[in-house]
Image (cartoon, rainbow, N blue to C red):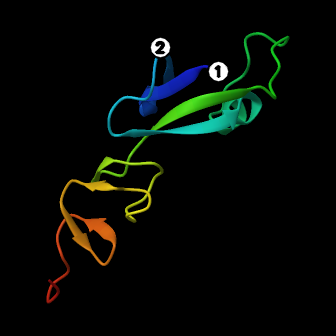
Amino acid sequence: METLSPYDESARVFNCLPNDCPSAHFQESNRLGEFLVRNGLRPVDFTTNHDSMMKECKPCHSNCAVCTAFGTAKTMCPTCRHVWFRDSCVKVCPAGES
């Protein structure tokens, strides 16, 4: 299974990584064919099995230092960069709340 990470989302450049995802990223498994379609890419090699699984590294929400999925709930973002408010990681507490 290859691991890919979009380091330059605007340029649509994907890199193969030798190990796990970098910090502040989470790993998601995808079918190769679905990944290609979702990212508007065409396969170079039409003999490849596009049903094969691959790993994709995706960035955490900007409020999260460590995550298991994209979001700010404690279940997805166990390490918050800022403050917790009602089980969500937020930059600042809403006015009038503590």
Is residue 88 visible in the rendered structure shown here? yes
Quarter location, residue 37? top right
> Considering the numbered disc 1 on the image, is that residue within a helix, a strand or a loop?
loop
Say which of 64 and 79 sits in front: 79
Relative to 44, does residue 81 appear above or below in the rendering?
A: below
Q: Residue at x 21, y 54 (%)?
A: 81
Number of residues whose C-alpha sits closer than 10 Å to that of mark 1, classed few (under 14), some (14–19) or many (20 or more): few
- Point out residue 20 in the picture as x, y percentages from the top left corner: 45, 25
- Point out residue 51 in the picture as x, y percentages from the top left corner: 81, 29
Say which of 76 and 44 sits in front: 76
The quarter of the image holding the C terminus is: bottom left
- Point out residue 93 in the picture as x, y percentages from the top left corner: 18, 76
Q: Which residue is mark 2?
A: 18
In the rendered structure, which amino acid carries the disc numbered 1?
Met
Quarter location, residue 7? top left
Label pair 1/2, CB-CB below 8 angstroms: no
The quarter of the image holding the N terminus is: top right
Q: Residue at x 85, y 11 (%)?
A: 47
Q: Which residue is mark 1?
A: 1
In the rendered structure, which amino acid carries the disc numbered 2?
Pro
Number of residues whose C-alpha sits closer than 10 Å to that of mark 2, classed few (under 14), some (14–19) or many (20 or more): few
